[in-house]
Image (spheres, rainbow, N blue to C red):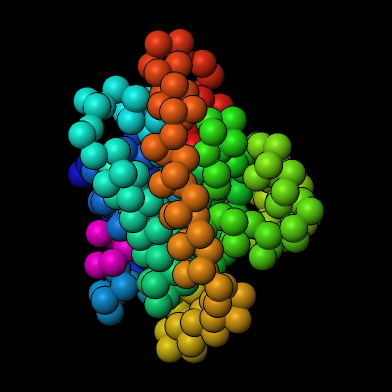
Amino acid sequence: MTNGLHCTSAAGILSLRIDRPHRMNALDGPTAEALIDALTTAASDPTVRVVIVTGTGSAFSTGADIVEMAAAEPSSDAQADAEETMRVAAALVRAVLDVPMPVIAQVNGIAAGIGVSIALAADLVYAAEDAQFLLPFTSLGLMPDGGSTLLVPAAIGRARAGAMALLGEPMSAADAARCGLITAAVAPQDLDEHVRTIARTLSRGPRRALELTKRALTASTLALLDDALERETAGQVELLTAPEFVQGLDAVLNHRQPRSRRESR
């Protein structure tokens, strides 16, 4: 394990587990970069046939670590910091999509903020029945990013996406499966074995056929992702440097509220 990411590989299956349970797997800078590096390396590794992304403990990932951001020393260049934050968000999603072989998201608990984007960028998404998907950006004076302004409506339509993005309404795994946001909801005690069974099946499949199928599905459904990432970057950089967000960070640091709403985005 390094930088909050636990990596194991066996029989062509690479497992990447976000391992910051004390922060509900909120992503700090080193962990995000470690995940990008692991996925980028996997993309060119001929021994990898399938990738699984999951989290340790009760959460998949509660997004970017807002408390870490709040505790950081004030920067002399807030614009550059905001642009770097958005670069990492876009790189995370791109890293998942650019792996040529199938990626499975094993959503073992709450997925919030960029955690939702990481999960939805995967080719197959299996979630524990008690998991939830949450885009809590507007409560912090921010907008959804990580490609979620495209990934979510592409799966469930504009109206339901609006409820998640504008109102911050959580979606249960059962509802997510019913409306097509994820592949299936699975009993928590069965999730790991279910995902492993799917991964073993894929690892024995014809690699090139799976690669070309993934590429075609991504091209036909997410052709406008670059445009979405550009819009999100422009809007989020503005919001990240606005007084309202700075005040919100101070509130997080000085008046810690429940993690699911205030310590992630």
x and y percent of residue 147 in the render? 51, 58
Report the predominant secondary structure element of the magenta stretch: helix
x and y percent of residue 40 in the render? 28, 66
From the viewer's side, name the closer residue of 117 and 74. Answer: 74
**Res. 166 visible in picture:** yes
- Does 167 sit left or right of 107 as displayed? right
Residue interval drawn in magenta: 37-41
x and y percent of residue 208 in the render? 43, 88
Instruction: Give me the residue at 22% from left, 25% from top.
Output: 73
The relative height of residue 229 versus residue 239 in the rendered view (above or below) is below
Residue 123 colored in magenta in the image:
no
**Quadrant of the drawing holding the N terminus:** top left
Instruction: Give me the residue at 53% from left, 63% from top.
Output: 228
Q: Quadrant of residue 71?
A: top left
Residue 39 colored in magenta in the image:
yes
- Does 2 sit left or right of 96 as displayed? left
